[in-house]
Image (tube, rainbow, N blue to C red):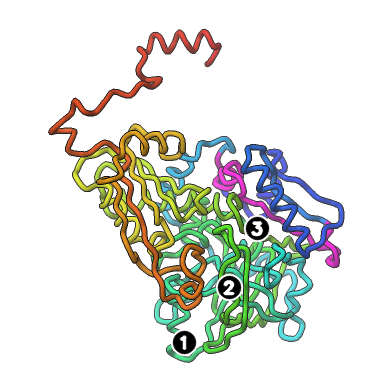
Amino acid sequence: MAHKDLREFIKVLEAEGELLRIKEVVDWNVELGAVSRRMCDKETKGSPAPALMFENIKGHPGYTFFTNTLASLRRYALALGLNKDTPVKEMIRTFHERIKKPIKPKIVKDGPCKENIFRGDNVDLLKFPTPKWHPKDGHRYIGTFHAVIQKDLDTDWVNWGLYRMGIHDKNSTGILIIKGQHSSEIFRKYQDANKPMPMAVAIGQDPINVIVSAAGFPAGTSEVDMAGGLRGEPVEIVKAETCDLYVPTTAEIVLEGEVIPGELKMEGPFGEYTGYYGGDVFPKPIFHVKCVTYRNNPILTGSLEGVPLVDDHIMASVSHSALARWNLIDVLGVPGVQDVYFYPSAASWSMAIVSAKRLVAGLPQQIAFGIWASKFGSSSGSACWVIVVEEDVDPTDINQVIWSMTTRCDPKDRVQIIRDRGWCTALLPRIPRAGRVDFTKSASSIIIDAGFPFEWRTADPDSIPSVANWENWPESVRKRAREILHEK
């Protein structure tokens, strides 16, 4: 089930017809991003588009760049070790079941990630074929599909996260540390103690490692343990060269260094997952890279962000859906919950559809506040739209969701707006720019009860009409219809 490393996953993609090798010269400056964007748009419009391996990047002979890794549900299924035609609902349930059985990593003494080691003045980030993705991006962004590894100052908690990193020069990058995120919680402790924060960045690896890094697990959770659960076997890790952090042994590239409290440098903007240039240009912490290790013939990976659908939207859609289902069913015990789906076209974070049996009054509110109390729903830009449908509606089918909303929901008393809910991410485009920069603003959220009123079930059951769907016909007639159409 598990893939040993990125290279093995690429072989799987090639065997499944999910890889395109581009051998002609491509410029890292905007051109590479345009090719990636074109393929993402094809996938979004219904034409299957493969992952991309750029093998001839201008100014970087001998280096390759891999992208669009998870820009389709087919490749996400393959990353989980499933058939590429697995329905998304089954993928979400598989993710949910596997994270209930985390597996601790296996520590080894050495690994391929240390085949080449450069320290100090020999560090040169500019030798890698890092793209400038969009025309208005402020930097070449080396950190877009990776794992940032940080250790809490006071406990044994090690956090893996995915935070953008724009290159400043040969040995430093910016890093987006947003209030409310785990990276911010950890960094604040180093700031209070006036100590540099050690940090490692793993680039180019089994995509499961990136999936867990981008997921919204609760504080204190070990993402590497969760990666083991999703893989069905432990992740092999090895001690970094310059600090006490441990990194995946098969990572293509590892950056090691520190973030010093109080040191800031202008960074941004960047074409973000919201579909807009986000984060603006304002001072952000600096990651000083003290050591770089990498495999022979390293494969740099990255992800285009921007208008849906791109890697991040597919990746976050499945993981957030699974985590919300786990949180509502296993942690909170909310009655009647069936399935959850964060729509990738809503930038994966913004809209959650939940199907549930109406067992108690006030269930939509209970569901919404359960999601908002979690890590992945805590900002007012996450799950700001919560739509609760009944158990006969498939939340992954937007046609069924819209049908339910427009036929079962009377907006005057079934829609609830929650004003000023929680902290607001700096990347949320629907609040004023000043609030994005200084984190002083919050945004509203909405709960839509898209089912028939709960009280009808006991007080007025005749008001609930029968549904005229495929299941209406007797099984004998349905069987005959399938025979006529030569269906199996």
What residue is shown with label 1? 191
Q: Which residues are magenta?
A: 56-82
What residue is shown with label 3? 304
Question: Which disc is residue 280 wearing?
Answer: 2
Say if mark 2 contacts mark 1, CB within 8 Å: no
In the picture, measured across the screen, residue 464 lies left or right of residue 278, that is: left
| Mark 1 residue type | Gln
Element under label 1?
A: helix
Which quadrant would the N terminus be assigned to in this image?
A: top right
Measuring 45% from the left and 55% from the top, which residue is drawn there? Answer: 350
User: Which is more toward the observer, 59 or 200?
Assistant: 59
Residue 145 magenta-highlighted: no
Query: How many angstroms separate mark 3 from mark 2 (CA)?
Result: 18 Å
Say if mark 3 contacts mark 2, CB within 8 Å: no
| Dot 3 or dot 2, earlier in sequence | 2
Measuring 39% from the left and 59% from the top, which residue is drawn there? Answer: 377
Q: Which class describes the residues within 10 Å of circle 3: few (<14), some (14-19), or many (20+)?
A: many
Element under label 3?
A: loop
Residue 329: percent from left, percent from top: 31, 48
User: Which is more toward the observer, 223 or 410?
Assistant: 410
The quarter of the displayed image where residue 420 is located: bottom left
Taking 204 as reference, is 72 above or below it? Answer: above
Measuring 40% from the left and 81% from the top, which residue is drawn there? Answer: 154
| Dot 2 or dot 1, earlier in sequence | 1
Residue 69 magenta-highlighted: yes
Query: How many angstroms separate mark 2 from mark 1 (CA)?
Result: 23 Å
Residue 383: percent from left, percent from top: 40, 55
User: Which is more toward the observer, 26 or 364?
Assistant: 364
